[in-house]
Image (cartoon, rainbow, N blue to C red):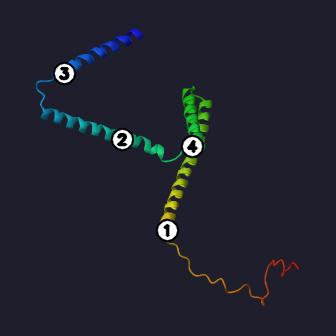
Amino acid sequence: MAGRLTRKIIAAGRKAAEAAKANKRGNRGDTPELAEAARKGAAERMKGRKAAEAQRTTQRSSSINKRTVSAEDIRQANTASQFRDMQMRIDDMDEGLRKKSLQRMLDAQQAEFDAMRASEVDRASRKSTQAARDRKMKDKVTLPEMPFNKGGMATGKPRKGHTDYRGNGLFK
């Protein structure tokens, strides 16, 4: 293994030396205009490659960066993995009553799990919608005037039901 690696390194060194000699001699067809055009073309290609790579990186990381991973998310991922493993085990089983009953049980658990995940998505959607509305309506909510200084209960009328006044009522 080491011998093969050293041979590759030696071959690469020879190629580099030959390329250096060729560069010293220069290409007779090279002109400053052609060299400038080649540099501009290389710069454009490099810019295009960088833009494409940045776009791929953004697409890859955008779904990851949308939220933090909580312990509940990890538990749900483990549960989904266990469902897949169990489904593979059931698929490998021979046809029969045991396979059918296990498949029904797994389907019921999967449906319950999917419903729980869907309700979480709905709850998160409602929460974000309400937060957006709260931000939008901040400082725009007004309340009507409320006349709180009109007094308490009327005193001359009989009161129906239980009234607890602690100091002046039923408990004296």
Identity of the amino acid at label 1? Met
Front-most of 109 and 103?
Answer: 109
- Dot 4 lies on which element? helix
Identity of the amino acid at label 4? Asp
Residue at which label 1 appears: 137
Query: In this rendering, which labeled residue sits more in front, label 2 or label 1?
Result: 2
User: Residue 75, relative to residue 160: is it above or below?
Assistant: above
Query: In this rendering, which labeled residue sits more in front, label 4 or label 3?
Result: 3
| Sequence-first tag of 4 and 1 | 4
Front-most of 10 and 104?
Answer: 10
Q: Could you tell me residue 52's position as x and y percent?
A: 32, 40
Q: Are marks 3 and 2 in contact (CB under 8 Å)?
A: no
Front-most of 31 and 150?
Answer: 31
- Judge left or right: residue 34 versus residue 143: left
Q: Residue at x 62, y 30 (%)?
A: 98
- Using a 10 Å C-alpha cutoff, classify the residue at mark 4 as few (fewer than 14 neighbours), some (14 to 19) or many (20 or more): few
Identity of the amino acid at label 3? Lys
- Judge left or right: residue 170 versus residue 61: right
- Using a 10 Å C-alpha cutoff, classify the residue at mark 2 as few (fewer than 14 neighbours), some (14 to 19) or many (20 or more): few
Q: Which mark is residue 24?
A: 3
User: Residue 158, relative to residue 137: is it above or below?
Assistant: below
Residue at which label 2 appears: 54
Identity of the amino acid at label 2? Ala
Front-most of 25 and 116?
Answer: 25
The furthest residue to the front: 24
Query: In this rendering, which labeled residue sits more in front, label 4 or label 1?
Result: 1
Query: In this rendering, which labeled residue sits more in front, label 3 or label 1?
Result: 3
Q: Measure how far apart labels 3 and 2 are at the Cα level.
A: 37 Å
Residue at which label 4 appears: 73
